[in-house]
Amino acid sequence: MSDFTLGLVGVGKIVRDQHLPAIAATPNCHLVATADPHASLPDLPAYQGLEAMLDVHPDITAVAICTPTHLRYSQARAALMRGKHVLLEKPPGATLSEVEDLIACAKQQGVSLFAAWHSRFAPGVAHAQQWLADRQVQRVEIEWKEDVRVWHPGQAWIWQPGGMGVFDPGINALSIATEILPQPFFLQQARLLVPSNAQTPIAAELSFTDPEGAAIAAAFDFRQSGPPTWDMHVESSDGSRLSLTQGGCCLMIDGELVVEAEEREYQGLYARFAELVANRRSEVDVAPLRQVADAFLYGHRETTDAFIE
Ligand code: NAP
């Protein structure tokens, strides 16, 4: 596979925790520079913005956009218009319309656009998808709960429009569900609990169904203390039960352990990006973002206690 040079846009928590080790493990991806108004990385040229980075480094062929979501569109579009391949951290945009425009833009420019749903690269997901492919789903229970102070420390943007609140992690669950469930599913009801000093929910309860009437329930909560719960249980009409737990690291089918592996999602994600870049192909699935948009469109909103960091 051919080599490519990368510029990172936004040097925050996810870049330090996940992108850097994954890039280091991707032999054909060469990190050249970063763009962030304040943060930088040791021994790497750093610029305060994307344009400045690309002006000085015309050799950069691809960028990974890892800034807060409301900045995704303008930065991705600027990079695409300069002929760069673009990896979009999840969620791929603040709105569906802007993602659609990015897809058109990438096509017009003949470059790769990759909506990186990292949770789909969890070790148990592909096997779960295969197992469910020819089954009829009867019931699904999704629980995605984590402590916002641990996973999003000081991130004020998460409470602002476009920040998505608890849907920022919740969309990871939806990215798995839209990948593994054999039928499309649709929102029936949603309850969104929004802190009195925020624009986005701290917790959400969602009910969906599919064309065959499956009961699909999801509970997202940012108020968890202790370890996170990132679990999904699926019952099929033949009485079998699949459990994908620990964010997809562990897969059990009918009580038998099928997959238990270390989390290495971002390595898989960069390997896929490298493949897409080599073939100038794009991969942008908006299904998880559409589910979130539907929840905001159709959910009951209730005000709850103010969130104090
Ligand atoms: P973060 O820690 O707030 O990092 C974002 C970085 O972008 C900050 O350093 C921020 O600088 C910088 N930035 C702000 N404006 C910029 C601009 N105009 N140009 C370049 N950089 C700019 O957030 P994060 O947790 O890394 O999340 C970033 C994205 O990744 C989000 O969309 C999130 O949904 C996604 N993600 C996060 C996680 C996670 O577990 N945290 C997991 C997967 C995906 P300032 O702080 O100075 O504003």
Image (cartoon, grey):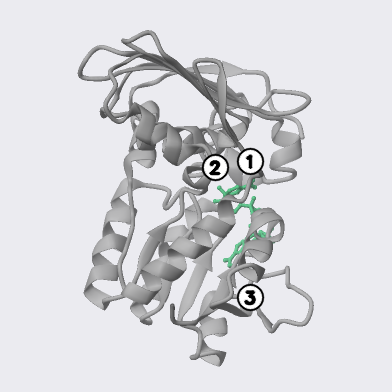
Nearest the viewer among 246 and 195 is: 246
- Secondary structure found at label 3: strand
Q: Which element carries disc 2, helix, strand or loop? A: loop
What residue sits right under mark 2 in the picture?
Answer: 123
Q: Are marks 1 and 2 in contact (CB under 8 Å)?
A: yes
**Figure quadrant of residue 8:** bottom right
Residue at 53% over, 76% down? 50
Looking at the image, can residue 295 be seen? Answer: yes
Camera-side residue of 198 and 209: 209
Kind of residue indicated by mark 1: Ala
The reply to whether the residue tagged 2 has its Cβ within 8 angstroms of ligand 1 is no
For the point 78% across and 25% down, the residue is 226
Distance, label 1 to label 2, CA atoms, is: 6 Å
Viewport quadrant of the C terminus: top right
Quadrant of the image where one finds ligand 1:
bottom right
Up/down of 20 relative to 211, above or below:
below
The residue positioned 33% from the left and 38% from the top of the image is 290
